[in-house]
Image (cartoon, helix red, strand yellow):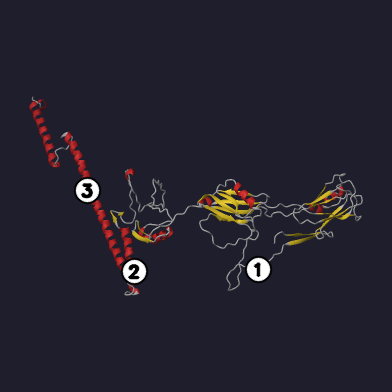
Amino acid sequence: MTRINTNVSSLIAQNNLGRVNGDLQNRLTRLSTGLRINSGKDDPAGLIASEALRSNIIATEKAITNSERANQLIATADSALGQVSQLLNDIRGLVSEAANTGALSEEQIAANQLQVDSSLEAIDRIAQITSFQGKKLLDGSLNFNTTGVNNAKVTSLQVDQANFGTQTSIGVELNVVATATRGKLNYAFGAIAEGLSLQVAGSNGAEAFNFAANSTIEEIASAVNLVSDATGVEAVVEQDATKGKITVSSYGGDNDIVLTANSAGFDPGDVRVKYSVGTASTTSATFSAATGAQPAKLNVTLGVSQYAAASATVDQNGDEDAFTVTANIKGTDFNDIEIDIVDTGANAAGSETVTFNATTGKLTIDVDALSTYAQVVDAINNAGAADNAPAAALFTAALTGTGNAGGDAVVTGATLATFAGGANGGAVTATANDVVTAINAASGNTLVTASLATGNDGHEAVTKFSQFAYYGTPQANNRLQFLAPTNSPEIRFASSSGQSLSVDTTTDPRVLGQSSFTVQSEIANATFNIKARFQ
């Protein structure tokens, strides 16, 4: 029995049929796609070339599509801008028409204004609603990024507008390679010897000038600057920088000081100077360098006289048993106080009493016939048996003799000694020479040098001023300024009705009294008065 799987003729026929069907399928595929190469087996080399061509074709088609889309976007924006341009032209026409106030009434001008307002609103509306596929075109939201740019080939850059998103500002790092400079032409003389014609040309235009002989450079600069708007050229008369200088004057004579900047220009001389009263007898100066917008400061602390206590020495035995009484309060208040030693018989030796009467100016010591000088000293210092605390609060006594250390009996008498030598301190004693030395020796002061003004020998004392004086300011301060003393900071200006404010230098100022009060003790003649030093 013949089987089909062993029928060679049938197998050959099947293979031929399969090959014909495959070839038919390939041809049908080519007919349906229109392509000769549909897979790699059709033509491997040709497939590579066809895919490259297909990629270029697709890119070109997309580029064409993008161009068409960009053209559509530009057409949309152009149409909106055309409307804006037409509205602007209408506004310009309306403004020109409204300028004819002689022929148009106020109502017509107001109507034109309404139309202008409507046109402006329309422009705003066009800017807000003009869009292409949902993207706003004219509202200012579009921005761009530039990448892949060769910085070496960028010769100039101009930014007309920037969009910072939600931020109001952003930090920018700027590296200035070279700064632009202004073109200039220098004329190194003060005047021209002969008449000449000068033509000045700039970015805005050109102008011709005629100058006569001996015309100064100031006159030439003035003429050029009158038309600088038309030419774009400005003339500047240059001057050499000078060293700043100021004279610090004090009340009186021979005490004026000149401060001179060590270098020329404004900044080296921009220093503030101040005199203030110190507490020591020496004069010093402190220099503070400029910080930020604050200029340098030179604070001179003036030396003042020192307070001294009054004293009196009682010496009845030729430097034997002598003792000295010194006021505990420095100043002149105890000058001319007299010391009396009396024996009323009321006190025993060792119980001496000491009283002070400010009204009569007496320091009275009541002793016994057997009292010694040492016991008198103890009584004044409140070291005896009697209570002399009030006197001891005001005076201090000490044995100063070279004898037997106060062991002799005291001798009574009136006005045995008078207090002297008390001095009130605080008065300025610093002379102009002292201030010059202090300023030039101030640590860190390299900006200014102090010297005496011409004709001054510097032996007189200077006066303080509590406010800093400006030194080196670009313009003089010509305002009238009133400065009150530190202990009376209020200044009052008064003027009668109908009269202008003026300064009276002839009428004596009103004299104020000094505050005082009196303390009365239970003991007779034990009173003292306290008076303020200042009015």
Name above or below for residue 193 compared with residue 291: below
Image quadrant for the C terminus? bottom right
At which x and y percent is residue 35? 14, 40
Pointer 2 residue? 114
The residue identified by callout 1 is 507
Amino acid bearing label 2: Leu
Check whether the beta carbons of the residues at disc 1 and disc 2 lie within 8 A of each other.
Answer: no
Q: Position of residue 198 (x, y in %)?
A: 36, 58
The residue lying at 24 percent from left, 49 percent from top is 66
Q: CA distance from mark 1 to mark 2?
A: 69 Å
| Foreground disc of the pair 1, 2 | 1
Q: x%, y% of residue 160?
A: 35, 53
Q: Nearer the viewer, residue 46 or 315?
A: 315
Relative to residue 425, is residue 120 depicted above or below?
below
Q: Looking at the picture, which amino acid does disc 3 mark?
A: Ile
Q: Nearer the viewer, residue 18 or 243?
A: 243
In-image side of 227 versus 321 (left or right): left
Q: Which residue is found at the position 18% from the left and 38% from the top? A: 50
Mark 2 / mark 3, whichever is N-terminal? 3
